[in-house]
Amino acid sequence: MSRRKICVVITARPSYSRIKTALSAIQAHPALELQLVIAGSALLDRYGNAVDFIKKDGFEIAAKVFMVLEGENPTTMAKTTGIGVMELTNVFYNLNPDAVVTIADRFETIATSIAAAYQNIPLVHIQGGEVTGNIDEKVRHANSKLADIHLVSTEDAKQRVIKLGEEPGKVINTGCPSIDLAKGVLENPELDFDPIQKYGGVGMQIGWKEGYIVVMQHPVTTEYRLAKEQITETLKAVDSIGYPAFWFWPNVDAGSDGTSNGIRTYRELQKPKNIHFFKNMEPLDFLKLLKNSKALVGNSSAGIRECSYLGVPVINIGDRQYRRSRADNVKDVSYSKEDIKEGLKKAISQEHFPSSDLYGNGDSGKKIANILAEIELTYNKTIAY
Amino acid sequence: MSRRKICVVITARPSYSRIKTALSAIQAHPALELQLVIAGSALLDRYGNAVDFIKKDGFEIAAKVFMVLEGENPTTMAKTTGIGVMELTNVFYNLNPDAVVTIADRFETIATSIAAAYQNIPLVHIQGGEVTGNIDEKVRHANSKLADIHLVSTEDAKQRVIKLGEEPGKVINTGCPSIDLAKGVLENPELDFDPIQKYGGVGMQIGWKEGYIVVMQHPVTTEYRLAKEQITETLKAVDSIGYPAFWFWPNVDAGSDGTSNGIRTYRELQKPKNIHFFKNMEPLDFLKLLKNSKALVGNSSAGIRECSYLGVPVINIGDRQYRRSRADNVKDVSYSKEDIKEGLKKAISQEHFPSSDLYGNGDSGKKIANILAEIELTYNKTIAY
Amino acid sequence: MSRRKICVVITARPSYSRIKTALSAIQAHPALELQLVIAGSALLDRYGNAVDFIKKDGFEIAAKVFMVLEGENPTTMAKTTGIGVMELTNVFYNLNPDAVVTIADRFETIATSIAAAYQNIPLVHIQGGEVTGNIDEKVRHANSKLADIHLVSTEDAKQRVIKLGEEPGKVINTGCPSIDLAKGVLENPELDFDPIQKYGGVGMQIGWKEGYIVVMQHPVTTEYRLAKEQITETLKAVDSIGYPAFWFWPNVDAGSDGTSNGIRTYRELQKPKNIHFFKNMEPLDFLKLLKNSKALVGNSSAGIRECSYLGVPVINIGDRQYRRSRADNVKDVSYSKEDIKEGLKKAISQEHFPSSDLYGNGDSGKKIANILAEIELTYNKTIAY
Amino acid sequence: MSRRKICVVITARPSYSRIKTALSAIQAHPALELQLVIAGSALLDRYGNAVDFIKKDGFEIAAKVFMVLEGENPTTMAKTTGIGVMELTNVFYNLNPDAVVTIADRFETIATSIAAAYQNIPLVHIQGGEVTGNIDEKVRHANSKLADIHLVSTEDAKQRVIKLGEEPGKVINTGCPSIDLAKGVLENPELDFDPIQKYGGVGMQIGWKEGYIVVMQHPVTTEYRLAKEQITETLKAVDSIGYPAFWFWPNVDAGSDGTSNGIRTYRELQKPKNIHFFKNMEPLDFLKLLKNSKALVGNSSAGIRECSYLGVPVINIGDRQYRRSRADNVKDVSYSKEDIKEGLKKAISQEHFPSSDLYGNGDSGKKIANILAEIELTYNKTIAY
């Protein structure tokens, strides 16, 4: 019997980290063949090219899709998506997969969904059913309505996808595969590398060994003019408490220039002594860095997901993670310097939280592979009500 | 105070007919400015170029968008959509509308939705919440999830869109504007033109004055290889009963070649004596032709919508209109020649049905314009549950 | 030693016919591997899909590229070319050929040239150095300036490409491979099939066995509004002399609708009794049909090339073949009905001409393959003066 | 009488600087209307967004075209060109100019040429007829073959375009408009601003007032893997002589990442004390900076053009300017550190050269505008031989 060809499309480095254990499980499954497509910003050096990590992790890349139109504004986001539809249609036509997997809710993920659905290829959507705001919110649920099979991360998400009119038998809570990596970290939490030595980065040499925080704040798409202002508040808060901080550059998005400019400007003018900047880090190292930190600051989904399992305190800024299910470790604050500072101070002085299984218990990758091997693959559906 | 700029995108001739009274009402409304974009197959001669009709009806065209990639298969459908995203993004960027209106569920309508939503332009979806099957089903509900305001045609559709998690205050049953035209026909039903003389067409001169039927059967997108077989059954059924028939060519779609080839082949080999073929007809004339016919055969949505109001019997073939709300005038049959024939015989011998207001009562266009003038225009939303 | 991968891109059915013997010779050559790409109108049924012919001829298709944007006007011609650049870039990236072959001067051939040249793939241009007018003229010489190796059809063309500043050692007169097919026909000229029986077509059954003419008239790109008028003159001329005629539909081009409409309108209104219409014909059959005809009428390049070798009289209408080298068989006439009629009358009454080797002597395919196997493949060049 | 609409397309910041006086002259001409289109990297912050300069200079932008596909490799260069064809076709369709102007030979300039030529818009090519190497060489001459009117910069270039078969009356030596700006600088050469104070930049504060050099080295397109190696040699040479240097970042191109990475890496590891880095500078300021420098090092065309007029010594590295006409001020050297160093030492110790009029005498902008106002605009041509 021939193996099912499962084509997974990764359009951004963080999506790779999140899905990695599922990729391994698909690759290892005797009834499945993995077709890995790397597209969009995941290919680009300035957002942290994921290709080297991916090869090092032992995956073969079936196709690379350059689709990011430069400009980083809402107009080029839309056109990038149009280019993505054209390019991914070609890729699926040539690879002829039995199913295509699209991940989460970044704006360009709908290109994967259209290219598959319109060519009558069964579409699997991972991480549907969650709630945020902005364009991601529209894209995520539109992906659900284009998809045939839904592998969600929480019970809450499962109920929401079913309410959207999807057939309950096609909606399965696998937990989030990002938690699989975190499981290994929880079992072996030691920070066994020197971050600055291993990853370089720019900014001050900071004395992180006695305790540090991690910062990761992405621009919020539909408010991109505010991006610079918002990031500056966070910079001021982190600078003023003077506690050692590892800061990660944001992803590509409309507005990343506002955010990036904000960081660059602040750095050059204020020369903060306690902040060291990284472009990116291998996923496992990043989780270890988080586990050993006092807190994560910003609006990264890692704060909501991985940190819930790891028990790391999170100061979650603004509404990017609005209405995502969250465990006790998350403290929501506004964009104001004062709020962030107050949250930070409290986090630094407190212990970590107990591990939560809200986003799964560490075997999501295998669950996903098993479902892909066994579930009936169809591409016609009708709303349930 | 400046008028709201309402950009309506028409991607196929039938969509124009359906929306026409709303266009007139928008144009006439003192608080609105109409920006009419004609795109896709609505521009192409071989699917019945709508441009001449549109100009004759007194509308100015703000932009024309050529986006149909030739090939008529699922792959080119997907790419056409990608091109549409790129092109429509430009158009909206240049026209800078206060709201964009996308209509119904043809595959390329999602290009309108993406181009508007990603550029933070409030998106109005007309005719959401209905149920069919195939790719249209996926596209329609994905459009709903990308849209901010929903102007639906039936009470049933309204409840369904609300169930999809849309804010009830943004979901309004306006009825279907196609019924507005039908209202005029019901008030003045006489067939005041000779169809063959006015529209030419090809095939036999048929004696239609004592009674005739109308045929309109589109290919069903995801089964395009069967298109030829299916149309041939209908051709045989219509040919064998020998009753005068006006037959309309199908729209562009994956498979239209199968359908078109089926028609051409049958015509050349069998030379059916009772069938005359038209490419297209002005909407009002088409409705008069329907009103004066014994029955409509095929799978056109006109059978479900306009004919419910006109009371014309419909022999609805196959599952293209699957789960659309229908009045008593519709008789569903399979693709088999025998079923179609039986349905036809019964329809020819029976009276018309009483008018139903299932799809509105003739003032939808004005309702739509009034809502567009008054409703709050937003582009951020969050699912209701 | 690994074989050189030669990627040949065919964008229109006539280009296939012309290059066919070269394809066979490449395929048969022990040092070469053929990568055949079929693109543009060569894939489309309504211009005579070449795919079936190609498979029947024993070639494997490495990639199909749908790139024709519907609309058939100068704007969609330009955009089709842009889509072609994007799509062919993908194809070459994936096939990774040692050289790419682009043919002649149709508007979309520059897409092949750009996709190859920009990716540093040696580019071979076939049929450069000729002279016509219109956009083809610009495209042909631009192709020469993007190409690294030039395989031309006549001595005249060779001298012209060298004058363009190309290195003389990279400009080789191979003759035109279309003549190779004609060679077989000259050796075995019998019309061994019944055209109507074998190819169907539409229009009158005509008594062609006692003599007939062939008509093939393409629209002239930059004057597409005149296309209908021009074709009507030819229709009138052919109709009025009453001599049996086989008429071939034109290629895709801006204006083909004008030409096609002209033909359809004339046919339906005038019902010419002596004309039978074909969509297309296998190349060898077409040459046999030409060889046994009294004359070819129109503006096809077959009149200039193949007919010079076959000795068939040609009434060449208008300026589409302006300044192409021509043998004695060609009589140039204007678009006027009277001129065409007079030319036709004379041709019907005269004998065929002796065979000319102006465009080669029948071994071009093999010459092309041998050169591709042996010539140094480079992608950097500098103008010679 | 209505004014001729002249659409000038700028795809990179340096092209703007070069053409600026022509834009002013077109804008000021009573018979002309300027339609300025800004496209490609000229819009992007990271290559030095030209939009602010342009607005400050008093020009209105008729359209902005985002067309750069991220990736910076030969494949994305080709696709960027394809996107450019699609987008610019739209722009010209909407602006409906009487002539389109394309500038020089960057890879994406052929998109302008195709979009205009295929839509039958007279195409004016500026700076044709020169000779370099690499893909620019192919693109430049292909542009000439697509263009109808040629406004060249030198007598040598004029003769070359005529040899390409262009009609001599359509080939006019206007000189290069970049010299117009230089004329003002020659008349008023004082460096009336502090570069670091006005433009910021990064790197050491250097003591430039006693003498400095300027460095500007772009990657060479078809050898992009070598870019890092090559730039490093230059960095070493400049670092080792210890003389104050203002270094400008390269343009977007395949390979700019190699070059940029080379610069970044060297800067962080070696911390050169005598180099200050700028992203870009207003054209007039840049020329003043050049005029007051000891020498220009690198491969910028400014060394060949503006510096010939300004008399500034140039150490021209590698073959990027291969076969461009050059005056006595240019010293060609290889990519080796030693050669560059030796050239630098000599240049620092010598006087400036006398001004040369090889590239014009300072009134090119006006000449160009006058020709555009008066020359017959046609879009059909045939090669002269």
Image: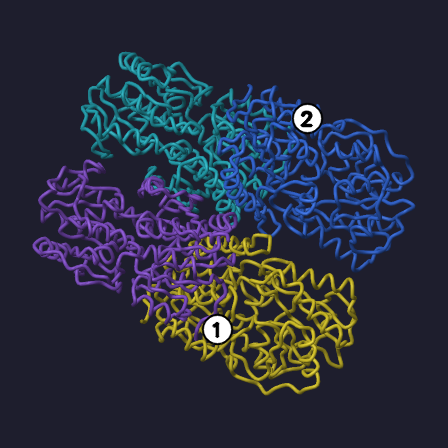
Chain colours: A purple, B yellow, C blue, D cyan
The residue at the point 56 percent across, 66 percent down is: B58
Residue B240 in the image: state x and y as whole percent.
76, 74
Disc 2 and disc 1: Cα gap in Å? 63 Å
Q: Which mark is residue C367?
A: 2
Q: Cβ–Cβ below 8 Å for labels 2 and 1?
A: no
- Asked if residue D51 shows in the view, the reply is no
Out of B292 and A367, give the one closest to the viewer. Answer: A367
Whether residue D254 sits left or right of residue B273 in the image: it is: left
Q: Residues within 10 Å of mark 1 (few under 14, many from 20)?
A: many
Q: Quadrant of the N terminus of chain B?
A: bottom left
Whether residue B150 sits left or right of residue B304 in the image: it is: left
Picture quarter containing residue C157? top right
Residue C380 in the image: state x and y as whole percent.
50, 25
Marks 2 and 1 share the same chain: no
Residue D162 in the image: state x and y as whole percent.
58, 24
- Asked if residue C237 shows in the view, the reply is yes
Whether residue A300 sits left or right of residue D183 in the image: it is: left
Residue A214, relative to residue D230: is it above or below?
below
Q: Which residue is mark 1?
A: B130
The amino acid sitting under disc 2 is: Lys
In the image, which is nearer the foreground, mark 2 or mark 1? 2
Out of B210 and B110, give the one closest to the viewer. Answer: B110
The amino acid sitting under disc 1 is: Glu
Q: Quadrant of the C terminus of chain B?
A: bottom left
The residue at the point 26 percent across, 12 percent down is: D349
The local secondary structure at tag 2 comes to helix
Q: Chain of mark 1?
A: B
Q: Chain of mark 2?
A: C
